[in-house]
Image (tube, rainbow, N blue to C red):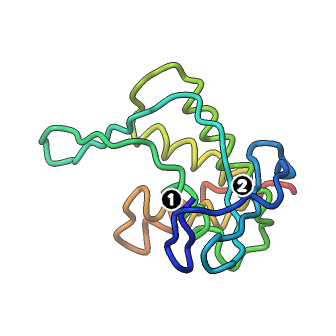
Amino acid sequence: MRCPFCAHDNSQVKDSRPTEDNTSIRRRRQCESCGARFTTFERVQLREVLVVKNLGDGSVARREPFDRTKIEKSVSLACRKRPVEQERIDQLITGIQRQIETMGDAEVSSKIIGEMVMDGLRQLDSVAYIRFASVYRDFSEARDFEEFASTVREVAK
């Protein structure tokens, strides 16, 4: 594993343990060159999945490997400054990833992934749900927010 501080290629694993939700392994490492310590996470990948992105202009769809970090970034942004625990966000993202990997398809539409995120955020936090929807559904006017928000009901926590 490459050291994030000095870019040396070798590091020693000092400690390994499963994460709280048992979906990954947390490894504490120490660089053999500079001695810096850092943490890595190892997750199981059940299958390689390609995400099919329709470009919307009638051109050929683009395909790219599924990237969990893209979902993490968008969900974290939607939940920013909201009273949502990081553990619940991680559970949502892991659940979406497992659903995608166990679907049995080598390709999945970005639209399906977006709907999975929308469904998860609807249960997690109504404001985060509206924030994500505003980007995902490309709201262009304040009226779009009003119409969408009027369909959202608070979910009991």
Is 10 positioned to the left or the right of 36 in the image? left
Is 135 positioned to the left or the right of 120 in the image? left
Quarter where residue 1 is shown? bottom right
Q: Where is residue 144 in the image (x, y as percent from the top left)?
A: 43, 65
Q: What residue type is labelled 1?
A: Ala
Quarter where residue 138 is shown? bottom left
Q: Position of residue 129 (x, y in %)?
A: 61, 60
Between 45 and 85, the one lying in front of the other is 45
Q: Residue furthest top?
A: 104
Number of other residues with Cα within 10 Å of mark 2, as a class: few under 14, some 14 to 19, many 20 or more? some
Q: Which residue does the numbered mark 2 point to in the structure image?
A: 90
Q: Do the residues labelled 1 and 2 touch (CB within 8 Å)?
A: no
Q: Where is residue 63 in the image (x, y as percent from the top left)?
A: 29, 39
Task: Tell us which disc is closer to us: 1 or 2.
Answer: 2
From the viewer's perspective, is residue 144 above or below residue 90?
Answer: below
Name the secondary structure under disc 1: helix
Q: Which residue does the numbered mark 1 point to in the structure image?
A: 133
Between 130 and 40, the one lying in front of the other is 40
Q: Residue at x 52, y 43 (%)?
A: 115
Q: Which residue is drawn at 68% across and 78% down?
A: 36
Q: Position of residue 108 (x, y in %)?
A: 42, 32
Q: Residue at x 57, y 70 (%)?
A: 3
Is 134 positioned to the left or the right of 3 in the image? left
Quarter where residue 15 is shown? bottom right
Give how far apart the Cα atoms at labels 1 and 2 are. 19 Å
Q: Earlier in the sequence, mark 1 or mark 2?
A: 2
Q: Which residue is drawn at 65% across and 49% down?
A: 93
Number of other residues with Cα within 10 Å of mark 1, as a class: few under 14, some 14 to 19, many 20 or more? many
